[in-house]
Amino acid sequence: MSDKPKVKVLVVDDEPDIVDLLSYNLKKEGYEVESAQDGIKAVKIAAKFNPDVILLDIMMPQQDGVETCRQLREIPELKNTFIIFLTARSEEYSEVAAFDVGADDYITKPIKPRALMSRIAALFRRESKKEQELSQIKIKDLTIDRTSYTIDKSGKIITLPKKEFELLYFLAKNPNMVFSRDDLLQNIWGADVFVLARTVDVHIRKVREKIGDDYITTVKGVGYKFDLN
């Protein structure tokens, strides 16, 4: 990492011991680290620090991690920032809520530092592969632009959150092919990230709300496809 700018990581947790543990291990791996102990401070710091990765606790005073993530995703400069939730909560609704607001990964406590470093590295590997893909797809009346994460629909510009965009992009570059929820989870979130199948349904619904119902078709009992008909 010495020959290029350090990857910046923001650690957000209200437990000082966890912040210290993660910060120590991240710095040892060569990352530049900042920290915050609540969600409100995290948003302010992130806007200035512009981190590449945010490790975000869910249960925090003043403002929880889900609301914090929602606010972070509204900052244009952070559209490509990886957000990984770190939480002691394992309920399904917490996980769905996390991915619903734009999380890239969800890890339950206690945190194993070496495993966490591997998960961070895996996110960057997947992103590197995606950058080699076509920057733009023109299909039906849509122009899907990977560089800006925007959709041009007959002259109207629509901006999608990262995972919603990636889901649409993947289906559009494979038109008329049907993909199961598991297929989409593997290709969008990756094999090393455990995500509930319901998360795919939530993201599909949100994409449809923004671009219309005429593009992604549900194939009952099988999955979804981008329909050219």
Image: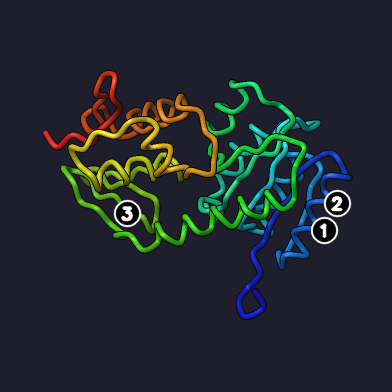
Considering only order in the chain, which callout, 3 or 1, is on the residue closer to the N terminus? Answer: 1
What distance separates the C-alpha of mark 2 from that of mark 1?
A: 6 Å
Residue situated furthest right in the rendering: 17
What distance separates the C-alpha of mark 3 from that of mark 2?
A: 40 Å
Query: Given contact means CB atoms under 8 Å apart, are the residues at marks 2 and 1 in contact?
Result: yes
Q: How far from the left and from the top, in percent, is residue 16?
A: 88, 44
Quadrant where the C terminus is found in the figure: top left
Q: Neighbour class for label 3 at 10 Å: few (<14), some, many (≥20)?
A: some
- The answer to whether 29 appears left or right of 53 in the picture is right
Residue at left 50%, top 28%? 196
Quadrant where the N terminus is found in the figure: bottom right
Residue situated furthest bottom in the rendering: 3
Q: Name the residue under label 2.
A: 20
Given this view, does label 3 or label 2 mark the residue nearer the observer? 2
Q: Name the residue under label 1.
A: 24
Residue at left 81%, top 43%? 37
Residue at left 60%, top 76%? 4
Q: Which amino acid does label 2 sit on?
A: Asp
Q: Neighbour class for label 2 at 10 Å: few (<14), some, many (≥20)?
A: some
Considering only order in the chain, which callout, 2 or 3, is on the residue closer to the N terminus? Answer: 2
Q: How far from the left and from the top, in percent, is residue 220?
A: 26, 19
Q: What element carries label 2?
A: helix
Residue at left 54%, top 41%? 193
